Image: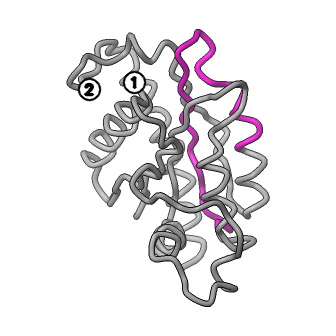
């Protein structure tokens, strides 16, 4: 199963990068899963002016982003919460996708915040956008509070109690992903 991780922030100094890299490392250790990090900070997608299928000259980063999500069997989105919502760079990227581009794709959402609520305020809005794209946000969520305290400077997890929570999150995401993949077959 191909389950990429979308990092929904491009901000300099973003702490969600450590979270996404840790999730990537853990997901790479699972059997039957191929994954990679789709870092929106590297894609540098311009503000949406035209849909991909209407562009006279398609932008390579847009083509690549849309193709990778099109190939995905399931998706993990890691996003920080900014002022009660998720970053504009993530909304802009998702807006490039065609309607129903995520149809029948299970989506696991990891929200991140410096505060004590783990970014839960942005979760419901992001779930609605995923549903509008035909995606299936899984019922489980993976909020990470006080992200600045969770990892050391090298990105190593300091609070090992997060690991079993991540494993439970993966179990649910992969259950839905495998079920949808089998049903499509």
Q: Where is residue 96 shown, x and y percent of the image?
A: 65, 67
What residue did someone put label 1 on? 164
Left or right: residue 46 compared with residue 128: left
Check the picture and name the quadrant holding the C terminus.
bottom right
Q: Residue at x 32, y 60 (%)?
A: 34
Check disc 1 and report its element: helix, strand or loop.
helix
Q: Say if 128 sits above or below 35 in the image.
A: above
Left or right: residue 18 compared with residue 129: left
* Front residue (pair 47, 178): 47
Q: Where is residue 165 shown, x and y percent of the image?
A: 45, 25
Q: Residue at x 48, y 37 (%)?
A: 11
- In space, the residues marked 1 and 2 are separated at their CA atoms by 18 Å
Tag in front: 1 or 2:
2
Check the picture and name the quadrant holding the N terminus.
bottom left
Q: Quadrant of residue 57?
A: bottom right
* 157 magenta-colored: no
- The residue range painted magenta reads 102-126
Q: Say if 61 sits above or below 89 in the image.
A: below
What residue did someone put label 2 on? 155
Q: Where is residue 92 shown, x and y percent of the image?
A: 65, 56
Left or right: residue 134 compared with residue 90: right
* Front residue (pair 128, 84): 84
Q: Residue at x 39, y 29 (%)?
A: 13
Q: Say if 53 sits above or below 11 in the image.
A: below
């Amino acid at each position: 199963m191909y389950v990429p991780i979308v990092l929904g922030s491009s901000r300099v100094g973003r702490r969600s990068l450590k979270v996404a890299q840790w999730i990537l490392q853990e997901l790479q250790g699972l059997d039957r899963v191929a994954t990679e990090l789709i870092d929106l900070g590297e894609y540098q997608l311009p503000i949406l002016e035209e849909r991909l299928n209407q562009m006279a000259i398609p932008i390579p980063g847009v083509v690549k982003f849309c193709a990778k999500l099109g190939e995905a069997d399931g998706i993990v989105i890691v996003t920080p919460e900014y002022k009660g919502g998720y970053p504009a760079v993530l909304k802009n990227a998702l807006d490039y996708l065609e309607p129903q581009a995520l149809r029948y794709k299970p989506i696991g959402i990891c929200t991140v915040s410096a505060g004590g609520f783990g970014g839960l305020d942005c979760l419901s809005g992001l779930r609605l956008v995923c549903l509008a794209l035909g995606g299936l946000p899984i019922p489980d969520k993976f909020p990470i509070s006080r992200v600045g305290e969770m990892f050391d400077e090298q990105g190593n997890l300091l609070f090992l109690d997060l690991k079993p929570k991540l494993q439970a999150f993966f179990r649910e995401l992969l259950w839905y992903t495998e079920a949808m993949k089998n049903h499509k077959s």
